[in-house]
Amino acid sequence: MTMEMVAMIVAGATIAVGSIGPAIGEARVAASALESMARQPDLAGTITRTLFVSLAMIESTAIYCLLVSMLLLFKIGPLFEKAVEAAQ
Amino acid sequence: MPNPVEDMVLFTLGPIPVSRIIVVTWCVMGVVIALAAVVRANLRVRTPGRLQQVVEGMLDWLGAEIRGIVGRPPEPFIPLVASLFIFILAANLTSLVSSLVPGLKPPTADITTTAALSTVVFLAVPFYGVAMTGTVSYLKTYVKPVFIMLPFNVISDVSRTLALAVRLFGNMLSGEILFGVILALVPFFLPLPLMFLSLITGTIQAYIFAVLTIVYIGGAVKVSEKHEAKETAQ
């Protein structure tokens, strides 16, 4: 198994595991925002604004995982490969 | 597999390499500036045209957002926030065109564009903080609530700039990658809902970037205002 294959597998695992947490978090945020909008429709504007901002904040953890997996695929994997080739 | 993070260099202008992203960015800028020139040339008070009404409605809405978050008159913040919002929105909407042309992508799906935009926000926060509340009271926001928080406040300033850049970049790039994969698997009909999705994502991301800019600037302006009020009360 080459280092590039390891990097590919780890990249898949990164995005798979890393999207669990943000998914649960976003679902909870959206559910509670809907609930509070149903209770107080007057505040829907404020709640929507805060909802979008907090969704963006939560989503950024998943984006970090995407970034890490892409780094593994396109930067670190080939780098390892070159290092191994240089060592041999 | 082509690397989605790096961009192809088209030609070099003297020592400066010009990539595809720069060409698309200048096209977007040209379209936005041309639209603005058209609106400006046709400004009317009594009988506003359609474009003027759209622009005025958007500015009113942005002003209301700023007033709601910062709690100040929105006029000083409108130029920066509206420029960022309009440019990012226009750049995101190019994904509709660029996803049909192989090798093209919206400028915001490149880390250099988003890093430049978030650097503007990073510099705008102290600018507005100093201009509106004075140097001393802006610097005092770094030692709030206690002096020990100074390094954390500095780290937060840097990390939120990074997060702002990476968020926009990651969202747009993931949309492009998803679209490319679906287009390779099922070339007919299935990419269409994804194009709608990228339309929604692009608009929401532009909104989020603008709102976060307002929130960061508002934090620098509002907190120091409270600080001043407390000091005058003592």
Image (cartoon, rainbow, N blue to C red):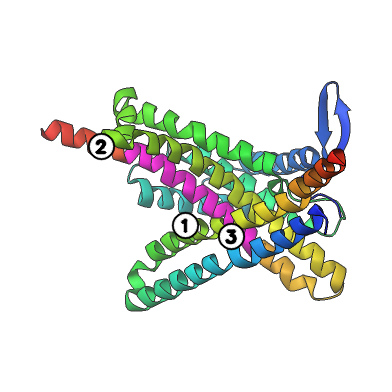
The three-letter amino acid code for the residue at tag 1 is: Val
Gap in angstroms between the C-alphas marked 1 and 2: 27 Å
Residues in magenta, as a range: B200-222
Percent across and percent down for residue B109 are: 71, 49
In front: label 3 or label 1: 3
Disc 1 with disc 2 on a shared chain: no
Whether residue B59 appears in this view of the structure is no
Asked whether, in this view, residue B184 is left or right of residue B89, the answer is: right
Please name whichever residue, B233 or B156, is drawn nearer the observer in this view of the structure.
Answer: B156
- Which residue bears the numbered disc 2? B146
Label 3 is found on which chain of the structure? A
Q: Residues within 10 Å of mark 1 (few under 14, many from 20)?
A: many
Specify whether residue A39 is painted magenta: no
**Residue type, mark 3 in image:** Ala
Q: Under tag 1, what secondary structure?
A: helix
Question: Which of B115/B95 is in front?
Answer: B115
**Residue type at mark 2?**
Val
Name the residue tied to disc 3: A62
> Horizontal and vertical percent for residue A66?
66, 57
Q: Residue B206 lies in magenta, yes or no?
A: yes
User: Which tag, 3 or 1, sits closer to the chain's start?
Assistant: 1
Give the SS element for disc 2: loop
In percent of width and height, residue B125 lies at 44, 35
Q: Which residue is mark 1?
A: A53
Look at 87% across and 28% down and name the residue there: B12
Whether residue A81 is visible: yes
The chain identifier of the residue carrying mark 2 reads B
Name the residue rendered at 35%, 30% in the picture. Answer: B132
Residue at 74% x, 62% y is A9
Magenta segment's dominant SS is helix
